[in-house]
Image: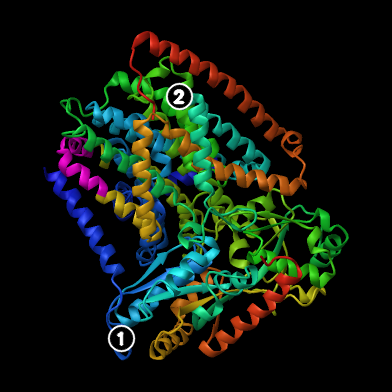
């Protein structure tokens, strides 16, 4: 395989002292930026892009890729420790990560997240090296009808993550979709639910809503419980033990595989793959009732998926110039500024450059692991900071995060309002997860559904005539029936084992 | 305990940066302009054409004036949200400027009978960059050239599916104008809405929709990759980046005028000295080799117009597009 020899050449380049330094700086800056909610990889890369132009192209790209990976990882740190998902894709990490932190197991959870990210990122890079052009070609066959079917499949998760009452879950899913519908309609371009306000015409920003429902709600809950600190137990071990690692290894692989395949599709976000991986892990688990209360596998799988999606996103980017996510769009801009137009020609004309960048992604992934594992203990101790300090700090970070995305005070108001709503949802046991799924997936489903119907001239047969979309629809139906059965079983087992029932979200 | 202080210090630092970037108002002293940092609002997401040009301009202006010029992305409502924030929600003191584009000016007022931001809300400073639209179809599409494709579209308008960000998006105007030029029935063709070129170009490459009209800069990577075929560029001359793609005129399809452009605007009512300072700076910038090199790498070309000519240009474009929109049912 020629690609591997070229990669080795690239690796030799990436391991020079200068380039190692760039990877380290990128990973560090990225992690720091990712820890701050709202300030995700997109804004980090956009802000730092002009600074990297003083570097050579190779070094600049290495640093930008490091920032990208670092920010993805940093988002999971706050998700686990403070229940603030820095990125939408970190939400599934919150579900089990935060309960683990509250049990004093934040350290091992962070360790598992770091190892999962590393393992999946590395696996995905092997895919990138081996099959990039071939895979990119296949991904183009995935059109609007296939996306519609995929979103429908993802929406079946509502049933599985619904908590006690299916009716409540469906209502919350619908409410989430309605909240997402605020703003300009995708087909008509006309404002919906705007009531004449320009802020509402711009729609509700996803990150503000999520910061509200998770972080701000958590502060309200902490106030009500008069919580002293996030964890009251001793911190104990800081790293996952061998047994935990062994148990999570299949989760790394499954999550990584789901993330990699979905990451190839332009426009399929890391959030979708992280949710699907989490759900799959719950379905194959022998103890699905432990999910949502602190299952290590519930951290491992979505973290692996999220990182594999990020790495796989480089395949359509480098071989076709298609950015599959907003941060990659900014990276593409970075490539263009250096005068490098992505595409198969990039591999031919700028071979050494591209292989060095790919190799430095391996290096960057390893760097993240090396930099972050020693920090795990430090981060985990944050859960013992008195809540009187932590609560206001979380509110402060949430405010900054909500403001930063669009530089808008309206978004801060939205975060606070959804914080209040989230508190009420919790208090009266309305599950929040279906709301979020409706909010994220609803508009994606609507858009691809409308696209498909425009393409077919109004006929719904387009979904059944194409083998891939028909297959995905069939899978959705099978998963749905499986989910309903699993849900019944889980509930039975829970009521057998314990009287009181805690909502999953 | 150490950690807490670190986190608190980091938060305070970030808050400080944010606050210093947000302070506005104050000095009316236009002669000493700029005396503090300038906020440069881009009404679109980072990474797009308007954003890239704005970042290059911000860097140049920041160096020339020794004051930070910070790009702030306020996407939403097809450019309306950011334009409104810059033109109506900020002081008219020159410390908030707008990266303007068709979508936040002429196409907005052509598409909506009561646009949230009117043409008269802008004080047009300079046009900076123009980019030619190109007609893209799948690489294995059966049409050899633009003429053949136009004939097909005229004969089968009901099979013509094309992508746009919305009914009054850039591509809608380009397609409506083209259908008018070739005598096709625009109302029978079918629009597929997408989030923009990054979603629509793969859709064309995969053969899911027939036609996409985007700028040369946006289509360049997939065209180079051989996944899409560019049938024509809409420009007076061929694009220097795509010398093999003939213009629409060359292929006998005349009357196509829609162009993509970006420039800089201030809120109407800003002191004239400030407008003049910016215009002079941009006139200088479009001669700067480093700036030109950057544009070249982004596959864009400078197309400077001074304040007077720029306002006239937008006015004409707006009237023309409003007529077109009314005639073809694009206007709401």
Please say whether residue B211 is visible from this viewpoint: yes
Q: Position of residue B252 (x, y in %)?
A: 82, 75
On screen, A456 above or below A376?
A: below
Q: Classify mark 1: helix, strand or loop.
A: loop
Question: Which residue is situated farthest in the left direction here?
Answer: B1
A183 part of magenta stretch:
no
Q: Which mark is residue B28?
A: 1
Please give left or right for residue B283 compared with residue A81 in the image. right
Q: Examine the image and state in which quarter residue B184 appears.
A: bottom right
Q: Which mark is residue A281?
A: 2
The chain under label 2 reads: A
On screen, A287 above or below A449?
A: above
What segment carries the magenta color?
A374-395
Disc 2 residue crowd, few under 14, some 14–19, many 20+, Cα 10 Å: many
Judge depth for marks 1 and 2 and give the one in front: 1
Q: Are marks 1 and 2 in contact (CB under 8 Å)?
A: no
A391 part of magenta stretch:
yes
Q: How many marks?
A: 2
Looking at this view, is A173 or A108 the one in front?
A173
């Amino acid at each position: 395989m020629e690609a591997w020899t070229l990669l080795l050449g690239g690796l030799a380049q990436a391991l020079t002292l200068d380039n190692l330094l760039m990877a380290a700086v990128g990973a560090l800056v990225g992690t720091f930026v990712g820890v701050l909610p709202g300030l995700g990889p997109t804004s980090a890369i956009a802000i730092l892009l002009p600074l990297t132009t003083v570097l050579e192209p190779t070094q600049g790209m290495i640093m930008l890729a490091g920032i990208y990976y670092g920010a993805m990882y940093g988002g999971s740190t706050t998700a686990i420790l403070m229940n603030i998902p820095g990125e939408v894709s970190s939400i599934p990490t919150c579900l089990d990560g935060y309960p683990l932190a509250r049990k004093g197991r934040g350290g091992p959870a962070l360790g598992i997240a770091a190892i999962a990210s590393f393992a999946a990122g590395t696996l995905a890079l092997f895919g990138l090296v081996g099959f990039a052009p071939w895979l990119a070609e296949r991904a183009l066959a995935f059109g609007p009808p296939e996306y519609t079917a995929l979103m429908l499949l993802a929406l079946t998760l509502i049933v599985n993550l619904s908590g006690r009452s299916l009716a409540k879950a469906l209502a919350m899913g619908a409410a989430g979709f309605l909240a997402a519908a605020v703003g300009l309609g995708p087909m008509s371009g006309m404002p919906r639910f705007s009531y004449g306000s320009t802020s509402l015409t711009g729609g509700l920003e996803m990150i503000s809503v999520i910061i509200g429902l998770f972080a701000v709600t958590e502060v309200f809950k902490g106030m009500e419980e008069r919580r002293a600190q996030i964890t009251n137990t001793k911190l104990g071990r800081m790293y996952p033990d061998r047994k935990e690692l062994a148990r999570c290894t299949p989760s790394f692989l499954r999550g990584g595989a789901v993330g990699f395949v979905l990451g190839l599709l332009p426009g399929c976000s890391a959030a979708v793959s992280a949710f699907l991986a989490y759900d799959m892990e719950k379905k194959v688990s022998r103890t699905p009732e432990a999910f949502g209360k602190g299952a290590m596998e519930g951290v491992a799988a979505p973290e692996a998926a999220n990182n594999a999606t990020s790495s796989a996103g480089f395949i359509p980017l480098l071989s076709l110039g298609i950015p599959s996510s907003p941060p990659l769009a900014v990276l593409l801009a970075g490539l263009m500024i250096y005068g490098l137009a992505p595409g198969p020609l990039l591999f031919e004309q700028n071979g050494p450059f591209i292989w060095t960048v790919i190799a430095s992604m391996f290096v960057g992934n390893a760097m993240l692991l090396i930099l972050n594992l020693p920090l795990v203990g430090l981060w985990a101790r944050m859960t013992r900071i008195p809540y009187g300090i932590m609560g206001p700090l979380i509110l402060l970070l949430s405010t900054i995060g909500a403001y930063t995305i669009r530089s808008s005070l309206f978004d801060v108001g939205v975060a606070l309002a959804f914080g209040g709503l989230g508190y009420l949802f919790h208090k009266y046991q309305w599950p929040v997860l279906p709301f979020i799924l409706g909010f994220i997936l609803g508009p994606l489903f609507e858009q691809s559904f409308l696209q498909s119907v425009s393409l077919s001239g109004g006929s719904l047969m387009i979904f059944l005539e194409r083998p891939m979309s028909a297959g995905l629809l069939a899978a959705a139906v099978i998963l749905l029936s499986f989910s309903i059965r699993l849900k019944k079983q889980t509930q039975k087992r829970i009521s057998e084992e314990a009287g009181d029932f805690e909502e999953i979200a | 305990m150490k950690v807490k202080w670190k986190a608190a210090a980091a938060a305070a630092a970030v808050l400080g940066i944010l606050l210093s970037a947000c302070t506005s108002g104050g000095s009316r002293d236009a002669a000493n302009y700029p005396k503090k940092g300038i906020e440069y609002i881009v009404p679109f997401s980072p990474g797009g054409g308007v954003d890239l040009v704005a970042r290059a301009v911000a860097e140049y202006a920041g160096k020339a004036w020794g004051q930070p010029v910070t790009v702030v992305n306020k996407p939403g409502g097809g450019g309306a949200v950011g334009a409104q924030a810059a033109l109506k929600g900020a002081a008219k003191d020159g410390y908030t400027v707008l990266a303007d584009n068709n979508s936040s000016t002429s196409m907005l007022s052509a598409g909506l009978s009561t646009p949230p931001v009117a043409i008269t809300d802008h004080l047009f400073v300079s046009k900076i960059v123009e980019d030619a639209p190109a007609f893209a179809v799948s690489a294995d599409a059966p049409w050899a050239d633009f003429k053949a494709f136009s004939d097909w579209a005229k004969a089968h308008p009901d099979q013509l599916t094309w992508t746009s960000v919305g009914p009054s998006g850039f591509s809608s105007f380009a397609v409506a104008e083209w259908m008018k030029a070739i005598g096709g029935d625009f109302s029978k063709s079918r629009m597929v809405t997408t989030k923009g070129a990054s979603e629509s170009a793969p859709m064309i490459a995969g053969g899911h929709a027939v036609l996409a009209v985007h700028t040369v800069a946006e289509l360049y990577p997939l065209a180079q990759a051989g996944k899409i075929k560019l049938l024509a560029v809409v420009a007076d001359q061929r694009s220097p980046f795509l010398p093999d793609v003939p213009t629409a005129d060359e292929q006998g399809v005349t009357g196509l005028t829609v162009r993509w452009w970006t420039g800089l605007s201030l809120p109407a009512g800003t002191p004239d000295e400030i407008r003049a300072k910016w215009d002079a700076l941009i006139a200088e910038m479009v001669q700067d080799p480093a700036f030109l090199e950057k544009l070249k790498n982004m596959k864009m070309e400078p197309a400077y117009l001074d304040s007077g000519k720029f306002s006239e240009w937008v006015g004409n474009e707006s009237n023309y597009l409003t007529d077109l929109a009314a005639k073809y049912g694009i206007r709401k």
